[in-house]
Amino acid sequence: MTLASGLEIPANRSATIRWRAFFSLVLFALLAAADGQPTGNHYEAVSILAGVPGRCGVRFSSLEFRLENCPLDYLIQYFDYGAAHYDIIGLPKRTSSAWYSIRAKSVTPATPKEQWAMLNPVLEDRFGFKWHREQRQRPVYFLTVSKTGIRFPVSGPDSCVTWDPKTGPVTPDLKYDRDDPTFINHLGCGVGSTPRTASGIHFQLHGATMQDLGNQLKPFLDRPLLDSTGVATKFDVDLKFSTTLSTGDNDLMFPSVSTALKSAGLIVTKGEAALDVIVIDDVHAPSGN
């Protein structure tokens, strides 16, 4: 079957951070518009095989969804519930380091958003994944505006393409160059792009509120970034920062996330807040095919 779209996550640490980030940005937008699993549709055939560490790939057509050599924590964090690593508590080490290849065929054609949603019962049925949500006091970052004001340009009517909430944002085609600076224009409003650079992230986000910005910076931080700006204006964001997953300046070529935001008129401060988290009650190696 010809695969209509696909992405890969390289094994290199810096590249892995960038691709984890890209998956999260697109998936967050998909889940933000989700209206539940399509009625009557599901994966009628699911094959799960042991994978090997290396390049985690995602491939899908309208009837088939493939995950190739992907770790279980990716399935839970990004492919299923859209959570960052700090949103999940209790993932056993014996399962977090396991890699799998999954091939799933749906009963009827499905959009990418629907295909992501249909992975939920696969995790629950085949991996025995049991979980619950609860609220806990957690470390966070607060985003506020400096005295200089926000320096991002205000989004214009043509700065990005509005996407249909029924289908989700545009899914990148394999043939499209993700390092092309115009790549973001093919994703849609509120969906970020992270073209590769020498040793850092070039983060772009068009038509975004400050809440969108905080949500889509999740992959690059060690705790949530909460919008405390009180600003509802939409901006076109363009930032360059280190691949280090923190707010510290640990990269010689690129500043930290917080330093990059400060140059754009935004201040990041540490604090605590009550947040919803996913607590894992049980998960194990998958049952047989």
Image (cartoon, grey):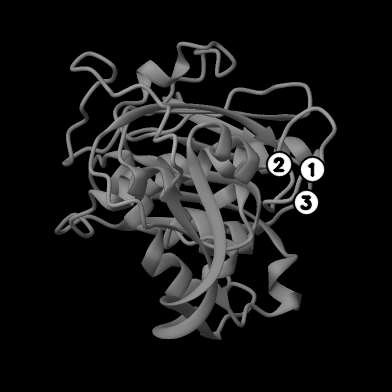
Q: Where is residue 235 in the image (x, y as percent from the top left)?
A: 33, 29
Q: Do the residues labelled 3 and 1 touch (CB within 8 Å)?
A: no
Q: Which of 94 and 67 is in front in this view?
A: 94
Residue at 54% x, 39% y is 261
Q: Could you say where residue 72 lies in the image, as x and y percent from the top left?
A: 62, 63
Distance CA(mark 2)–CA(mark 3): 15 Å
Residue found at x 56% / y 39%: 262
x then y, percent, for residue 90: 61, 82
Circle 3 sits on which residue? Answer: 52
**Residue at the spot of label 2:** 16
Give me the C-alpha separation between circle 2 and circle 1.
5 Å
Q: Callout 3: 10 Å neighbours few (<14), some, many (20+)?
A: some
Residue in the foreground of this view, choosing between 27 and 277: 277
Vertical side of 243 occupied by 253: above or below: above
Query: Is the residue marked by circle 1 packed among few (<14), some (14-19), or many (20+) residues within 10 Å?
Result: few
**How much space separates mark 3 and mark 1, taking CA atoms?**
16 Å
Question: Residue lying furthest front in this view?
Answer: 147
Q: In terms of secondary structure, where does tag 3 sit? A: loop
The mark tally for this picture is 3
The residue tagged 1 is 13
In the displayed structure image, the side of residue 145 where residue 99 appears, left or right: right
Contact, CB < 8 Å: mark 2 with mark 1? yes
Query: Which quadrant, please, contains the N terminus?
Result: top left
Q: Element at badge 1? A: helix
* Sooner in the amino-acid sequence: mark 2 or mark 3: 2
Q: Farthest residue in the right direction?
A: 252
